[in-house]
Amino acid sequence: MIYVICGPTASGKSTLAYKLKKYFDCPVINCDSFQIYKELNIGTAKPTSDELKEGNYYLYNLISASSSMSIFDFQKIFRTTIDNLLKTNKNIVVVGGSGLYIKSSFYDYQFVEDEQFVKLPEAFEKMSNHELYMHLQKIDEGSAVKLHENNRKRVMRALEISLSGTGKKSEFEEKQKHVCLYKDATFIGLDINRENLYKKINDRVEEMFSLGLEKEAKDLLKEFGPDTQALQAIGYKEFAKYNEEEVKDKIKQFSRNYAKRQMTFFKNQFEEIKWFSSIDEAYSFCINQ
RNA sequence: GGCCCGGUAGCUCAGCAGGUAGAGCAAAGGACUGAAAAUCCUUGUGUCGCCGGUUCGACCCCGGCUUGGGCCA
């Protein structure tokens, strides 16, 4: 059985994963977009280095903060990893707060292969949001209706894919069946009462500060610069933008906002998640299956 | 004790010849297929400090009270 643990930040996913790992003596695969970076520790609430030393943890500390990874890369490495582990393990735990990483790994999301994938010509960079959107309407109406013209990032992506010569982005998506590829996956969600969750988030940020988040973040910002992909993580980017007085509150606030976005994604993108309001309930459900 | 300025959304404030209010931030809800801890969309929030008066009608004018700040005794 594959147990896929979903939920917002600070809901207790890692704790549940660890308990299940102990119970089943099974591997744990990370599905979190920022725990893949070696240098980011305190702010990403990664399992402790002692825990990681126990072994049987996968896709943690994959790459350096100086590099970055796309969803395409992650999907590939995730599938290779889990397919290998499935040969020798009856149970596997997958944990992560990055809903899209989970979805693209478990569902038949398809991406244009690297060889065909071309970056948008520079001329597009200079266009206004509206101009870009008009362009997209012409070449991929299907994608355009799903996007808002202010969402420049996505409009550009859709253009990029359609211009890669492999067909329109919307056609690409229509071909997919939108079903889970792994038949024995059980999706477990942790849905903590909002008020308690926010309190846990605030408390955890306090704890991160006492563990030395400020030093970790500032050192990394100095080493890699504030534009680094890895340092766009909540708990890091704020040190480059806010003064001492505001930083902590901003990190708390952005974490709360993020938790809400995560819940929206999990609730509305995964029909198969079984929701539990506590770690213990989820744990006993898993071990009694 | 006297004089002056203020009390309007969770916060900072705007507003009006008298026709029961609006910005920013916060917050809530939503979208999501190569940056996803990212990116984007939508939406209110109200005894206009309290009591009375004038008025067809008061957040606005008048009186009193209350409360915060400043100045003078």
Image (tube, coloured by chain):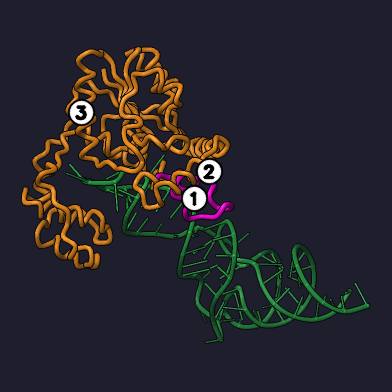
Chain colours: A orange, B green
Residue plotted at (45% across, 45% down):
A236
* Earlier sequence position, callout 2 versus callout 3: 3
Residue plotted at (23% across, 25% down):
A81
Residue type at tag 3: Arg
Secondary structure that dominates the magenta span: helix
Residue identified by numbered label 1:
A239
Residue type at tag 2: Glu
- Asked if the stretch drawn in magenta spans residue A140, the answer is no
Residue identified by numbered label 2:
A214
Examine the rendering and report whether any part of residue A239 can be seen. Answer: yes
The picture places residue A153, in percent across and down from the top left corner, at 26, 55
- Image: magenta residue range: A233-257
**Quarter holding residue A209:** top right
Position of B63 relative to A62 (above/below): below
Q: Tell whether label 2 touches label 1 (CB within 8 Å).
A: yes
Number of the label disc, if any, that sits on residue A79: 3
**Quarter holding residue A279:** top left
Residue plotted at (19% across, 15% down):
A87
In terms of secondary structure, where does tag 1 sit?
helix
Q: Chain of mark 2?
A: A
In terms of secondary structure, where does tag 3 sit?
helix
In terms of secondary structure, where does tag 2 sit?
helix
Q: Quadrant of the N terminus of chain A?
A: top left
Find the residue positioned furthest to the front. A223
Depth order, front residue of A116/A24: A116
Q: Chain of mark 3?
A: A
